[in-house]
Image (cartoon, helix red, strand yellow):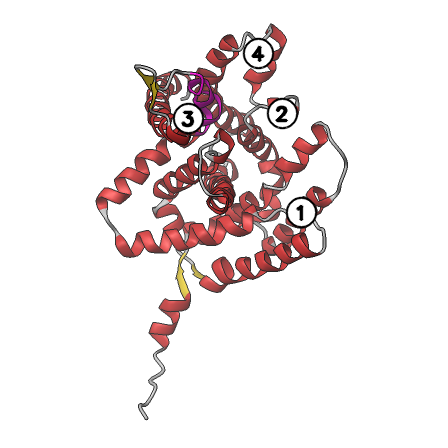
């Protein structure tokens, strides 16, 4: 029988990785999340596919949780300017809000006119917090804006010496609040939004480790979330519970993707994903608000339909939405460069 040689270096490299790769591949990961969001909306747009495929693709909504993790990480970096006293909290709020609201308005305001929304509805939608008033709004925008509001409050907790204790304390109520059956109404919107907070909290808590190139365990970022996912999945389907599971899918899949990107290190793949990542907010908004408008187009040539199972509509429409997203992104940069100093 052969002799097994115990290699400490190999074991460490196998079980741990440098947390900074989340930051190094942030743009690419945003692109991956964008692709997941585009995929997960396919069943809702009646794209024909086998039911098992629809269930799998429909669960790709964890792409939003990847966004939230990366946003939490990014906000930890951003809050350093406040911690050091370089800017005050009001300027921090302004810069964070304006970076979201400008591209958002460039898409939402024309949509309001197309739908002939009244003045009050348009004003409410223009704030970005409209998901807490209307069901059809962009929930992710409202979610991230609320998280920005509470970030200076949780910063003290999630940068303390017992930050993981506080992180756990923050996550548990989010999960339990979603579990409670309150009934229909706007409160359900709050339940849905708050249930997605854990990814942001975890990304924020890891901010220090990521910036300082600390080693992080594959067990903590992949194995344990998947084990917890299986446990809560069992409770949901066998015990009638209603725990949210997106964050437990998003974090391990994001981590696996990050490790793969670091191993493959293909410039073409990285540049393509980075391009999509830069359009993440705009592509999300156009996919939800603009793409459905294209469904009513005549997808036929000389009376012959070319929209087989809505695939043509979704593929061509998505490409057009990405083009619109790029245009909006470019205009947003021009505006933001003029109003942010």
Do labels 4 and 3 touch, CB within 8 Å?
no
Q: Visible in this render: residue 72?
A: no
Camera-near label (1 vs 2) is 2
- Magenta stretch: includes residue 19: no
Name the N-terminal-most of marks 2 and 4: 4
- The label on residue 175 is 1
Name the N-terminal-most of marks 4 and 3: 4
Q: Which residue is mark 3?
A: 282
Give the extent of the magenta segment.
284-296
Q: Which residue is mark 4?
A: 122
Give coordinates of residue 203: x percent, y percent: 50, 47
Q: Nearer the viewer, residue 37 or 238?
A: 238
Taking the spot 51% from the left edge, 29% from the top edge, the residue there is 92
- Left or right: 289, with 130 as reference point: left
Name the N-terminal-most of marks 1 and 3: 1
Q: Which residue is mark 2?
A: 135
The answer for how far apart the CA atoms under marks 1 and 3 are is: 29 Å
């Amino acid at each position: 029988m052969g002799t097994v040689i115990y290699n400490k270096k190999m074991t460490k490299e196998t079980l741990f990785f440098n947390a900074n790769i989340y930051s190094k591949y942030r743009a690419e990961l945003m692109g991956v999340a964008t692709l997941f969001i585009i995929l997960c909306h396919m069943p809702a747009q009646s794209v024909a596919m086998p039911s098992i495929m629809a269930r799998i693709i429909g669960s790709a909504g964890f792409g939003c949780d990847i966004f939230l993790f990366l946003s939490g990480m990014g906000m930890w970096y951003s809050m350093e300017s406040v911690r050091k006293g370089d800017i005050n909290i009001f300027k921090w709020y302004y810069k964070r809000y304006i970076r979201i609201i400008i591209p958002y308005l460039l898409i939402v305001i024309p949509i309001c006119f197309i739908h002939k929304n009244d003045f009050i509805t348009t004003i409410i939608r223009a704030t970005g917090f409209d998901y807490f008033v209307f069901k059809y709004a962009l929930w992710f925008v409202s979610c991230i804006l609320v998280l920005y509001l509470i970030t200076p409050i949780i910063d003290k907790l999630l940068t303390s010496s017992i930050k993981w204790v506080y992180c756990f304390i923050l996550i548990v109520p989010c999960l339990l609040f979603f579990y409670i059956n309150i009934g229909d109404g706007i409160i359900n919107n709050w339940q849905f939004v708050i249930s997605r907070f854990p990814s942001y909290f975890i990304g924020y808590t890891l901010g220090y480790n990521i910036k300082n190139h600390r080693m992080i365990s594959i067990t903590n970022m992949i194995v344990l979330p998947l084990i917890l996912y299986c446990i809560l999945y069992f409770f949901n389907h066998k015990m009638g519970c209603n725990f949210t599971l997106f964050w437990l899918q998003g974090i391990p899949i994001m981590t696996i993707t990050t490790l793969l990107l670091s191993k493959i290190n293909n410039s073409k793949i990285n540049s393509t994903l980075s391009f999509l990542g830069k359009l993440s907010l705009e592509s999300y908004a156009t996919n939800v608000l603009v793409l459905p408008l294209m469904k009513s187009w005549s997808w036929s040539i000389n009376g012959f339909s070319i929209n087989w199972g809505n695939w043509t509509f979704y593929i061509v429409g998505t490409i057009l939405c990405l083009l619109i997203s790029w245009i909006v992104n470019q205009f947003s940069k021009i505006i933001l460069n003029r109003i942010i100093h």
